[in-house]
Image (cartoon, grey):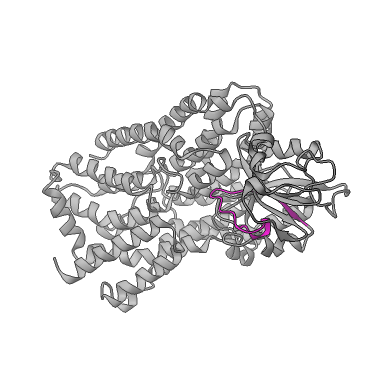
Amino acid sequence: MTFEQASLLILLAAMLALFSLSRIRIEVVAIGGLIAGYLLRLYPTDQVFAGFASPVVITVVEVLLIVQVLAHAKLFDKLAARFAASGRSGFTVIASLSAITGFISIFMNNIGAFAIMLPATLRISAVMKIPRRQLVMPISFAALLGGLVSLIGTPANLLVSDALAKATGTGFRFFDFAYVGLPVAVAGILLMAFLARRLFAEADAQPMLAAPARQVVTERRIPEGSPLVGNRLVDCPGLFAIQPHALIRDGKFVFGPLDQSTIEAGDTLLAEGAETVFADLAASDALVAESHPNGLQPDFVRIEAVVMPESTLVGSRIRSLEVFRSRGIVVAALSMRSPRIEGRFDDLQLSIGDILLLEGSREAVAEALDECECLPLATQPSVDAVSNAWLPMVVFACGVALSAFDFAPPDIAFAGVVLALALLSYLNIRQGMADINWPIVIMLAAMIPIGSAVATTGTAQMLAAWLSLIVPISVPLAGIALLLFIAMALTPFVNNATVAIVLSPIALEFAQAAHHSPDAYLIAVAAGASLDFLTPFGHHNNTLTMSIGGYRVSDFLRAGGPLAVVSYLLTLLLIALIWL
């Protein structure tokens, strides 16, 4: 093993560990690894920032811009409203919504497809009295499955196609992934529709817009005559089903053991409990919120919104949310994915997947959510909704056709779509570029030179030789089965683009050892990198799913485990039948 190979393996292991821990921002880890690779002389100076000019990165940016337009178009909200009136059965509803989500995900990134369908799905949950736990996880997994079908469905597909083009001169065509991806997606969607009704049947008694078991944190005042007055904090969980975290009197914390702290009229209580419990306490005047300046206005609304991965609110404390305060919007309650309650309500720090309950005028809330990149979970008209929802889709379909029939490469075809949408005033490119999730793009671009070094330093060849001692990689199906397993084992902890970058050079070495075309091996890498169903933190969709649907970690294992096993076996079978 050479110094370059050893240092590259150590660098990759360190970066994968940091990515999985999520303690440091992903773009910081990626840029740090990029600079470290240069200092270790793993690639020359002119290759350090080559990833930022890669057609893969450019295509991802273009698709993210297009997704912004399609999300504002509310096209699928309108279709879902008609669907909700159809009166179909539970299995049909879950399968149909998942199929629509999967279809959308064929043509855009997974989280974009999930974000477009989520508000419509929650509305259907409320109207058709289907618990959201039976709907949210299936559409999230359907978005991941839909990404298996096309070249642009997920960055992993673009990356393995780029690796194939560099190795053979020709990359995958637009729908080459569909031979394996489409049957796997269909089988996965049907399996999840079957499992969801059985695994999450316990929630069917309370099909509310808000998940019945969701816990929220809020700060409320104790009025005169409240039944809480005179009770000790230690008695609150048993008597009132809320967990107190702090008692404030005259602007100061009341310290002391819970069994010695007694509630008085005029106190302010910071507590955690179910949304329905706080609603009942408010109805009985046991707890009251501070009067809202917009409460009597005709357009006053209460809207739930989830903090998306690209939101500017991630890491901010409630007291610093000027985007709401400047518009007279109040954060009334917060459902936290990982509660860490210190200080007062305004001191709470936001993270991806947290759900805010906002109160204010409808137009102000819509503008604020658009500015800070949070996704509204309640139905509301967008202040800048696109008047003709179909025209942007037609323009996008033209770009897909140009790429699918090889009239233009994806980066050129979708550049034309972006230009057309801008000329038609559907897309403000300056604003759109500001709204892109740049940490993901930077991470992708920074990882490309490091992934290339796996091949240029001979590391891929060395790893392939090591693995050949364990698995007979000279047998094509054995090597493909191993690659698919490794990819699926890594992707719950590391983003799928990184998995594709790291494993693509190894796949090429496996193919060379077996004296076989690399197509099948790279298809296995792309599929395995996207089959991420086992943890709530492997993919942003899963993180949001856990928060919005009120799932537990074990729910991902119960539902995602069978789906992962079936997907693995079916993918391996299809690759053997079609690509070998």
* Residue 324 position in % (x across, y down): 73, 59
Q: Is residue 337 magenta?
A: yes
* Residue 210 position in % (x across, y down): 66, 37
Residue appearing at x 26%, y 33% in the figure: 577
Q: Is residue 555 magenta?
A: no
Residue appearing at x 52%, y 52% in the figure: 399
In this view, the residue farthest toward the front is 260
Q: Is residue 314 left or right of residue 389?
A: left
One can see residue 25 in this view? yes
In this orientation, which residue lies closer to the viewer: 520 or 305?
Answer: 305
Q: Quadrant of the C terminus?
A: top left
The image shows a total of numbered marks equal to 0
* Residue 97 position in % (x across, y down): 56, 33
Q: Is residue 482 left or right of residue 381?
A: left
In this orientation, which residue lies closer to the viewer: 219 or 182?
Answer: 219
In this orientation, which residue lies closer to the viewer: 153 or 578?
Answer: 153
Residue appearing at x 82%, y 40% in the figure: 285
| Residue stretch rendered in magenta on the structure | 329-348
One can see residue 274 in this view? no
Does residue 338 lie above or below 9 as drawn? above
Does residue 523 lie above or below 350 as drawn? above
* Residue 542 position in % (x across, y down): 48, 44
| Quarter residue 242 falls in | top right
In this view, the residue farthest toward the left is 469
In this orientation, which residue lies closer to the viewer: 402 or 536?
Answer: 536
